[in-house]
Amino acid sequence: MANSILTIDMITRKSLEILENNLVISRNVNRQYDDSFAVEGAKIGSTLRIRLPDRALVTDGAALQVQDDNEQYTTLTVSSQKHIGVNFTSAELTMQLDDFAERVLKPRVSQLASSVDADVATAYKGIYNSVGTPGTTPATSFVLLQAQQKLNEFATPMNPRYATVNPAANAGLVEGLKGLFNPTGTISRQFKNGMMGEGVLGIDEINMSQSIVQHTTGVTPTAPIVATTVTAQGSTSLAISFTSGSPTFKIGDVFTIAGVFAVNPQTRQTTGSLQQFVVTADVSVSSGTTATLSISPAIYTSTNALATVNSFPAANAVLTFLGGSATAYPQNLIYHKDAITLATADLLLPQGVDMASRQVHNGISLRIVRQYDINNDRMPCRIDVLYGFNAIRPVTAVRLWG
């Protein structure tokens, strides 16, 4: 029986299937906001304003104490367009779809998936809670339990929780946890696949990804301290001073402040651990001994409905930065699904081309545009995805440093 000709819609659907199957971290993040971007011809720079859950203070007594809304918002911008080119002949269009996918599509689309994953993995820069020892590959159940402790202390829902780790961390954890109070099926899976798998220490899935990125820390100054006591609720900047050095502070650098402890967002009681802060804008100091850092989370004391710390940072309180100076560390992630949001947008189907198709499935929109080269009987195509991502609820995620 003669082969049927593969259509552009068939190729687009198959490409989308391959893309989804090759995503790792992006598969387990929140994509519920995608419909807001599902409009004809969305462009880079389109922004979605996302409302975060309201928080209020519980009060004592019979008298009503009405509180204003404490609405918080964050934004998600469609800022990334990735594509990959494919060039095939009319003869290849007579192949069976699965054969065509394996030979032509899969090698290219899997690279596109890895690129999207690597982008989404950079959401770590907005996440402040951290566990692990920088420079040491995670290899014990303790680091996973520490991450769970952080999530629990910050009132993160118990499920679904995921972990995405790089190959080194995966190898370390499988070796360190092999046979350790694990059911026979789990041990068998670890032995056969070399993967941690599902249902490990309260984590729904632990996946290995080659797209986990590294964070290179800034150049740490000598003896950094708080320059001026913080007094304003909601502060997202911190004035510091130091004795010497020409420091650089990088987006994603994590530090603690002496005497400033984290609080549980529900009870507003201290967790007993210093609050970790993340730098949200690069700062370079070429002269002088002062700097102003943009930080997250915003500083709210326990008297405020949005409490993040037990007390304001005091002047002369010592800052301690995580990791060595100007050193690269893998940023494995343990997170609730709602911590990171990925939104894809519908790209325009252009006129004046041979063929164009767009398909959407499970929150992923993918477009293929095809031309025809009559001189060589070839069909150059581009496969595109337009998306944005952000750590919408960073408090529900933890960085596992390697």
Image (spheres, rainbow, N blue to C red):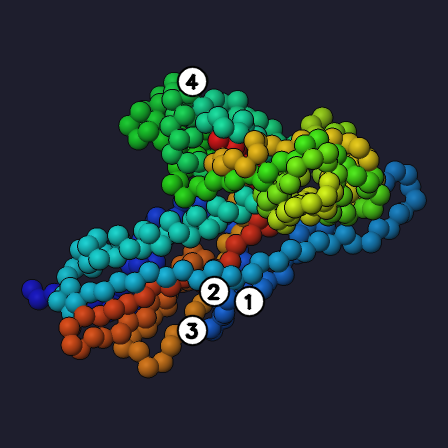
Please say if 351 is above or below 44.
below
Between marks 1 and 4 in the image, the one whose residue lies nearer the viewer:
1
Q: Earlier in the sequence, mark 4 or mark 3?
A: 4
Q: CA distance from mark 4 to mark 3?
A: 52 Å
Amino acid at pointer 1: Ser
Q: CA distance from mark 1 to mark 4?
A: 48 Å
Determine which of the numbered discs, if any, sits on residue 348 in the image: 3
Question: Disc 1 on helix, strand or loop?
Answer: loop
Q: Residue at x 14, y 61 (%)?
A: 95
Q: Position of residue 390 (x, y in %)?
A: 56, 52
Q: Are marks 1 and 3 in contact (CB under 8 Å)?
A: no
Q: Position of residue 43 (x, y in %)?
A: 50, 69
Q: CA distance from mark 1 to mark 3?
A: 14 Å
- Tell me the residue that label 1 is attached to: 46
Q: Position of residue 149 (x, y in %)?
A: 60, 28
Q: Are marks 4 and 3 in contact (CB under 8 Å)?
A: no
Q: Earlier in the sequence, mark 1 or mark 3?
A: 1
Q: CA distance from mark 2 to mark 1?
A: 9 Å
- Tell me the residue that label 4 is attached to: 180
Q: Are marks 2 and 1 in contact (CB under 8 Å)?
A: yes
Crowding at mark 3 (Cα within 10 Å: few <14, some 14-19, many 20+): some
Amino acid at pointer 4: Leu
- Tell me the residue that label 2 is attached to: 345
